[in-house]
Image (cartoon, helix red, strand yellow):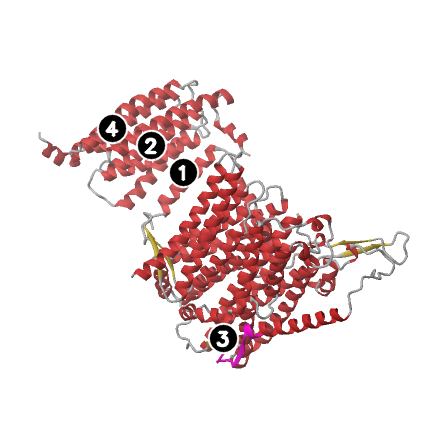
Amino acid sequence: MNTLELADWLPRSNAVNLLAGLFLLSALRAAGSRRVRGCISAYRWNSVALALIALVVALDTASRAVALAALLVLAIKAGLIPMLLARQVKQQEVLTRVALPTGMLVCGALVVLAFSQTRVLFGSDPSILASCLPVSVATTLVALFVMVTRRQALMQVLGLVLLENAIFLAAVSLTQGLPLVVEMGILLDLLAGVALLGLFVGRIEDTLGEGDVSRLDSLRE
Amino acid sequence: MPAASFDGALLVGAITALLAAVLAAITTRMRATGATAARVRHGASARALGAIGGVLAAAAAMRALAGADVQALEWWPGFPTQPFTLGLDALAAPFVLLLGLVSAVSFAAHASHGRGGHERLALHAGFVLALLVALVARHGVLFLLAWEGMTLLSAALVASDPTSARARRATYVYLAMSQVGAALIAGALLSLGARGGWTLEAMATAFATLSPGEASTLAWCLTAGFAVKLGLVPLQGWLPLAHPEAPAPVSAVLSGAMVSAGLYGMMRFAWQLPGSPPADWGTVLLVAGVVTALVGSVYAAVEPDAKRLLAWSTVKHSGLLAMALGLAALLHAAAQPALARVALAAAFMHAIGHGLAKAAAFLSVGEVAHVVGSRDLEQWGGLARRMPRAGVAAMVSVLALAGLPALSCFAGEWLLLQALLHGYSAGAGQLRLLAPFAVAGLTLATALALAACAKLLGVGFLGRPRSALADAAREQDPLVSAALLVAAALAVVAGLGAPQLLALLERPLASMLPSAPSDGLSAASALALTVAGASASPVGAAVSVALFSGVAVLLARLGRVRSAPRTAPSWTCGAPVAPRSQYSAHAFARPLRLLFEPVLRSGEDTATLQEGERYAPRRTHVRSGDARLLERPLLAPLVQSVLFVSEQARRLQSGQLHLYLAYLLITLVALLVWGRG
């Protein structure tokens, strides 16, 4: 099968839909897991799905830059960042403000909301973004929810990187890939950010005992 | 074509020179502290650059008044709209002329003494630059940026004395009121720009497409916003607090040029862009102007602080500016274009005349206050003899502020009075009712202003020194003294050359009132009003004053030749002659204070201690509250409600990361649901 046929077949195939489903499910798994390590592995799967979607887009548009970006995503987001995060795990249990089942219900509501509203926003367009954009918006909301409801600083960092994945997905699906320089810059930014945040998480845990950020409000004024 | 590019180059030169002045002052600060000579030289170069910038701006304004349309710069900032354009049209030209002259003398008189002197100089240059850009901006966003920059830089200068709690309070009040005004202006301009475009021309067309109700709402918002800068009652509270706290050269620019920027804003955005002012605009401005003029002059008359007295006098004069503008709008609406031209000319003339006189007054009084070390008039006295140049400059400029003929404020007040009187006889409806009260208010305010000026000069500069510091006061910097004399000379020239100045205002008047005939006022050598059949000649007035005083001096000389002066002790009822037996500033203002006590509510309380002496009181205590007319009843509920809302808003600021993130999530969801437009 040559490239032209592939480009013809891909949009009609369910490959992107499947990968987008994997993306969303892994994000939901990160929101629902009781173990910190489980969350991190969910993030890894999320990143793998993202890299594969980017690869599909690269094949679809025959763009070498997007393919390179996809490989970088695979290396950094699925490899390096989860490793850095896993190194910071001191406590196995996830501490939440909202009970996990309730949280999962809220996440489901957010996903429904994202799908319904995004469909209204963009109509039914048979391109790749038709399935990717609602997934990206839903993942954004779920990741924000994770950041809001978790007590540990580490889990908030995890929510942040998840949020970044969702935004990356939106960028890839909306624009068929950003310029390579931009993507590399974003990845480098993210890597430096996670490294720094890891440092701070360590410090916060040393200071506050358990890394419970709800005690940070004593810093106010 | 060469002429046009020359005019543009003048404006670009002015802006470049001011920028260079900022840079020169900043680089001086960064030099090593040891090299004093280099610092002084750099300070001098910054001052010189600033003064050159002012002169260039004034020259560009003169070219624009002479008929050139100065287009200077175009810069595309990447904004998805029209490019930022700087240009000097007929309406802005009188204000730029005033700003150029005032800033030039203020830089010349800015001896950057003390700690932080160079920072102040840099802020001063930046402030003047922002003011200039606000006046020549032809783009809404650029105007807003410059307007905000002007407010913030001048607020930094108001707060430049870090040890003064009074300056801190003034800065807060100034910033709070200015931001409310700026918010009104920004809201109106942004909603206009979003409809049409951002250039002034596009805004004018956007105004034309609006329904009358919307257009007048926008015009009223803009008017209220600019009224804050103008200091109209009830928005005057910040002005007498903030203007005196800045260093004297900055006070000169604040009172001399920034107040008239408020007038410029009203003329430009509430009158010229909509084509004509909204209904009842003239009535409201005229009434507010009369009240403001009265309040300002009463407070100036009872104020013991020399610089704050001048600031209250600024309130009075901005009241006159609002009166003139409101009267012009009323006459315009009453189909009296020729008289409207006279009233508008009064607004322009008074803005320039008052700006020059007030700048000179603030410079000279501020220099004296700096040398004496106190702004309290009770500490001054006998300074005309000890600081002769500053004394002459203060004398000339303060008398000009009182509106005496042949000095700079006279022409504007005279034109305003003529327009009021003839508007009464020619006008219909509201003017028949308003004009008599306005005339009475104008004359009362002028008389009270004369009392305030007599107090400032008589108590502060004549008599004997009331404190050791005043006794030791000497002129310090000859350059500053020379700058003071130049500033005062400008006030005299503007007074004597008023007819010529009026002739220059032809194009600004035509740009505001395109339909008016141009024969309302002719200005050969006198301010002759063909429409009103009245004329006044400043030169004639000056000649007659000189003649009469010359005769008096001559007679005195002749008398002295006949009888040699005798020296004898003066009889003072047996008490020793002391500086304290002079008329004090408080005593001078006491009759007025008693007269206006129902309005002032200063809660004055006098207690005389006899302490054994039956006929000569040992000591008199006077306790008098800070008079705050209108502020308590009008602003107190507002302040309370703002505090309440802020207290509620503080609850949102819990300091908890989760809550902030939750706000983000809620906003996102709300946008998804409702933000589809």
Mark 4–mark 1 contact, CB under 8 Å?
no
Q: Which residue is mark 4?
A: A51
Secondary structure category for the residue under label 4? helix
**Which label belongs to residue B525?**
3
Q: Given the image, on which type of amino acid does mark 1 rest?
A: Leu
Secondary structure category for the residue under label 2? helix
Please say if B522 is above or below A59. below
The CA span between labels 3 and 2 is: 76 Å
Whole-percent x and y of residue B292? Answer: 59, 64
Whole-percent x and y of residue B482? Answer: 56, 55
Q: Earlier in the sequence, mark 4 or mark 2?
A: 4
Q: Which residue is mark 1?
A: B665
Camera-side residue of A216 and B206: B206
| Residue interval drawn in magenta | B527-540
The CA span between labels 1 and 2 is: 15 Å
| Disc 4 versus disc 3: nearer the observer | 3
Q: Is residue B254 visible?
A: yes
* Residue in the image at 44% along x and 36% along y: B662
**Which label belongs to residue A135?**
none
Mark 4–mark 2 contact, CB under 8 Å?
no
Does label 1 lie on the same chain as label 4?
no
Q: Earlier in the sequence, mark 1 or mark 3?
A: 3
Q: Mark 1 falls within which chain?
A: B
The CA span between labels 4 and 3 is: 85 Å
| Disc 1 versus disc 2: nearer the observer | 2
